[in-house]
Amino acid sequence: MVISVASGKGGTGKTTIAVNLALSINKEVQFLDCDAEEPNAHIFLKPKIKETKKVYIPIPEIDEEKCTYCGRCREVCAYNVIAVIGGTDGKKGNILVFSNLCHGCGSCSYFCPESAIKEVNKEIGEIEIGTVESIQFIHGRLNIGEAMAPPVIREIKKHLNPTRTVIIDAPPGTSCPVVETIKKSDFCVLVTEPTPFGLNDLTLAVEVLRKLKIRFGVVINRSDLGDEKTDKYCKEQNIPILMRIPFKKEIAVAYSKGESIVKTFPEYKKDFEELFNKIKDGKPN
Ligand code: SF4
Ligand code: SF4
C-alpha cells in the first residue's frame, strides 16, 4: 500500500505525521521523502545512508553555426525557456536558454528543422538511499538555485518498493511537485491545522485529490487551537477526520530537538497504529 502524507500549506506537521506513522506500524516500511526542496524526515529518522545517486535532466545546447534563428524551438517550448532574436540586415541573431526553467522534455531538439540542438545532461540534485532499523529510506535533494523538483521526485519514486508499506512525505502545497509525488498513491493523508490559512489550503488540496481520484482523509494538528471551521468543512464535504493532535509543549520540544514523538513518548504509538488502521480500511471519498 502506498500512503502519501501531504498538506496544502507548509508548517502543519506533515513530516511529523509521516515519520511517526512509519515508526509505529508493525509492517515492513519504505519511507520516501519527496520534499526535494527541503527534505527533513532524515533529521527525525536518522537513517544510515548507503548510496547516493546524482539526478540529471537533458537540457538543450544550441549549435549557433547551424541555427537560423527561425524561432521554432521557442514556439514549442511550453515553459518559455528559450528566447530567440532573429538576425537583421545580414547580422547574426541571438538565442538564449534559461536552463533553470527547462523540464527536459526534448521538444525543442525534436522540432528543430536544422538539427541545431543537442541535449546535454545537467545535474540538478541527488537522491540518497539508506536504512533505519527495518525501514528502507530514500530522499532527494534539489541543488540550490534549481527549480525543477519533479525529476528528483521521479528518481526517488523509481525506487518505490511495492512489496512494502510505502509512506511518502510529499512537498507542501498543490503544485507540480505535489502531483508528481502523490499520483498513484492508494491513500493520501492531508495534514492541516484549524486556522483560516490552514482551511483555505486544505480546500485546494482536496480539489487536487478529487481530480486525481485518490482516497484521502484529514489529520488536524494543533487541534485545540484555532476554530471549528475545518471540522465543519470536513463534515459538509464528507471527509473523514482520521486523527486529532492537540498542541502539547512536550511534542514541540521533542520536534525542536529532532526527535520523533513515538520514540520520546511511546504512549502515542497506539494513536498512530489506529491512524494506519483507519487508512487501511478507508472508503472512497
Ligand atoms: S529551432 Fe533550431 S534553428 Fe530554429 S531557432 Fe531553434 S535552434 Fe535555431
Ligand atoms: S527541453 Fe523542453 S522544456 Fe527544455 S527548453 Fe526544450 S522544449 Fe523547453
Image (tube, helix red, strand yellow):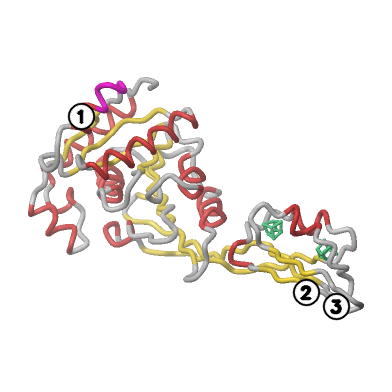
Residue 178 to residue 151: above or below: above
Res 222 quadrant in image = top left
Residue 193 percent location from the top left of the image: 22, 42
Q: Which residue is mark 1?
A: 231
Residue at image location 43% in from the left, 37% down from the top: 2
Badge 2 density bin: few <14, some 14–19, many ≥20, Cα 10 Å:
some
Between residues 227 and 179, which one lies in front from this camera angle?
227
Res 86 quadrant in image = bottom right
Q: CA distance from mark 1 to mark 2?
A: 57 Å
Q: Which residue is mark 2?
A: 94
Q: CA distance from mark 2 to mark 3?
A: 7 Å
Would residue 176 appear left or right of 261 to someone viewing this image?
right
Would residue 92 appear left or right of 218 to someone viewing this image?
right
Q: Which residue is mark 3?
A: 92
Residue 21 percent location from the top left of the image: 27, 42
Tell me which numbered mark, 1 or 3, is placed earlier along the sequence: 3
Instruction: Determine the residue located farthest toward the bottom in the rendered image.
Output: 91
Residue 253 in the magenta stretch? The answer is no
The residue mark sitting in front, 1 or 2, is: 2
Kindly identify which numbered label has been placed on residue 21: none
Would residue 97 appear left or right of 172 to someone viewing this image?
right
Ligand 1 resides in the quarter of the picture at: bottom right
Mark 2: which amino acid? Asn
Mark 1: which amino acid? Asp
Instruction: Determine the residue located farthest toward the left in the rendered image.
Output: 249
